Image: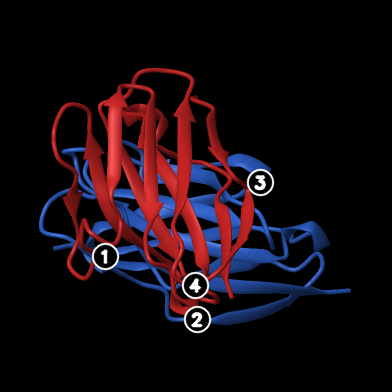
Chain colours: A red, B blue
Amino acid sequence: SAVISQKPSRDICQRGTSLTIQCQVDSQVTMMFWYRQQPGQSLTLIATANQGSEATYESGFVIDKFPISRPNLTFSTLTVSNMSPEDSSIYLCSVDLRVAGYTFGSGTRLTVV
Amino acid sequence: AQSVTQPDIHITVSEGASLELRCNYSYGATPYLFWYVQSPGQGLQLLLKYFSGDTLVQGIKGFEAEFKRSQSSFNLRKPSVHWSDAAEYFCAVGDSEGNKLVFGAGTILRVKS
């Protein structure tokens, strides 16, 4: 199975600032997924990132708030822009390894103060 | 669109007792089904998955799950629970196109000694 490195693992940020989260996979994958897990909640998909095309956002998530880059088949970033305390969550990237299933990074625990 | 229901928010079992966590899904075609476990402050670990074939699936840590198409269920079981199994368990459904996973709300398992 693939190994996903996600960083930072945690951060405390001031409201109004932006944070970029990086996700590195040790093999080439077509699609990468970004999820949000709000405190005490389940995981919700933010967007799907394909290399070479614009990310596809789920209802309730917009590119201006969560811009995503996917420069190659092993790397993606998610930026949380103009943060507010409501953005305090765990953000996780994931890849679909087909037969092996979906693998997740260890997550970025974000606290906005 | 697919959806997942985990009817039990919390479950408490005694160490050594058997465990069954319920999961019901809604999906029009043959689903890809997953169980993940999340320990406090940790990422998601894949316990087992069902794509096709034998409806009884064996996973890691002694867990198994049974796919019942007639009941749209994919319940997770373990014959004897250990204290280290205390965590939150998520059932998820995906599609054959390798698109997003939809997660249930999660079940928090407590193990009492």
Residue bearing the label numbered 4: A15
Residue bearing the label numbered 3: B62
Residue name at image x 43 percent, y 73 percent? B105
Q: Report helix, strand or loop for mark 4.
A: loop
Q: Report helix, strand or loop for mark 2.
A: loop
Mark 1 on the same chain as mark 3: yes
* Residue type of the residue flagged with mark 3: Gly
Q: Is residue A7 left or right of residue B35?
A: right
* Residue type of the residue flagged with mark 2: Asp
Q: Is residue B1 left or right of residue B55?
A: left
Residue bearing the label numbered 2: B8
Q: Nearer the viewer, mark 3 or mark 4?
A: 4
Marks 3/2: CA distance? 21 Å
Q: Is the C-beta separation of discs 4 and 2 under 8 Å? A: no
Name above or below for residue A42 compared with residue A8: below
Residue name at image x 24 percent, y 58 percent? B69
Q: Is the C-beta separation of discs 4 and 1 under 8 Å? A: no
